[in-house]
Amino acid sequence: MEKIKKILHSKTDRKPFLVLLLAPVIFTVWKFQGSPQFFDANLAKFFSPASDLAFLRIAYYGFSSLFFLFLVPAFIVKVVFKEKLSDYGARFADGKFGAKFILIAFPIVMISMIPVSHDPQYQALNPMYPDAGRSIPVFILYALIYGLYYIGWEFFFRGFMLFGLREKCGDVFTVLIQVFPSCIAHIGRPEGEMISSILAGLVFGFFALRSRSLWYVLILHWFIGLGCDVLCLMAR
């Protein structure tokens, strides 16, 4: 207990200690209480049979991701750490570098995903809303809801964890630390996606640190997710 007290009273140790302590708690709560499965088991019964439950479960997932993975860590940053969100990557910095990264990385990833999009196992999981391809307006609405998920995901890993641990752990070890839980979070997805999440975690982490912003990574990750959905819809 004495060691913990010393850590909590240390300017250099208190923040990384709380990030590493609270991050798994926040993520676990989101993983279970914020999941589509939680909606199916506990909330779907409150809607009429005529409701589009498939869309509502995805909407719940999007808003729960925004709440647990963005708003809760943002509250900790502002109230507990008394720091600015911009210090955690929530800013547009080095826009020229960020635009180049998106324009180069996006087509490369999309080309590599064309064979994967024909895999029945991958098609069964994407898009998360099965009727997303029903019409353009429906897909746009789905894309916006899906964007809430990416806001939460990227702020949690490439904001709260990455910039919260950087000062104490250094760039390399901080990136490696946030790669591990982001990879584990893909359990249940196809093996190839889990493997690619390791590479993505490394690239996204170092890029966020280099650009001092998580928004370019967020935009790229969101575009990749939607692009893969489009490829799956076309492959069907």
Image: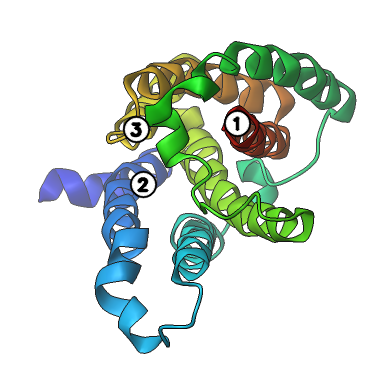
Which residue ends up furthest to the left in the rendered image? 1
Nearest to N terminus: mark 2 or mark 1: 2
Cα gap from disc 2 to disc 1, whole angstroms = 40 Å
Query: Which circle, 2 or 1, is nearer the viewer?
Result: 1
Along the line of sight, the residue nearer the viewer: 117 or 203 = 117
Check disc 3 and report its element: helix, strand or loop.
loop
Residue closer to the observer: 54 or 18: 54
**SS label for mark 1:** helix
- Nearer the N terminus, badge 3 or badge 2? 2
Mark seen at residue 14:
2
Front position in the image: 138 or 162: 138
Location of residue 212 by image quarter: top right
Q: Residue at x 73, y 26 (%)?
A: 211
Residue 185 on image: x %, y %: 33, 37
The residue where tag 3 is placed is 189
Distance from the alpha carbon under mark 3 to that under mark 1: 14 Å
Q: Reading the chain from its start, which is encountered first: label 3 or label 1? A: 3
Percent coordinates x, y for residue 178 in the rendering = 41, 30
Asked if residue 184 shows in the view, the reply is yes
- Give, as a three-letter code, the residue at label 3: Arg
Q: Is residue 181 above or below residue 63?
A: above
Provide the residue designation for mark 1.
Answer: 228
**Residue 169 in the figure: left or right of residue 184:** right
Image check: 127 left or right of 190?
Answer: right
Up the image or down, 100 lies above or below 230; here it is: above
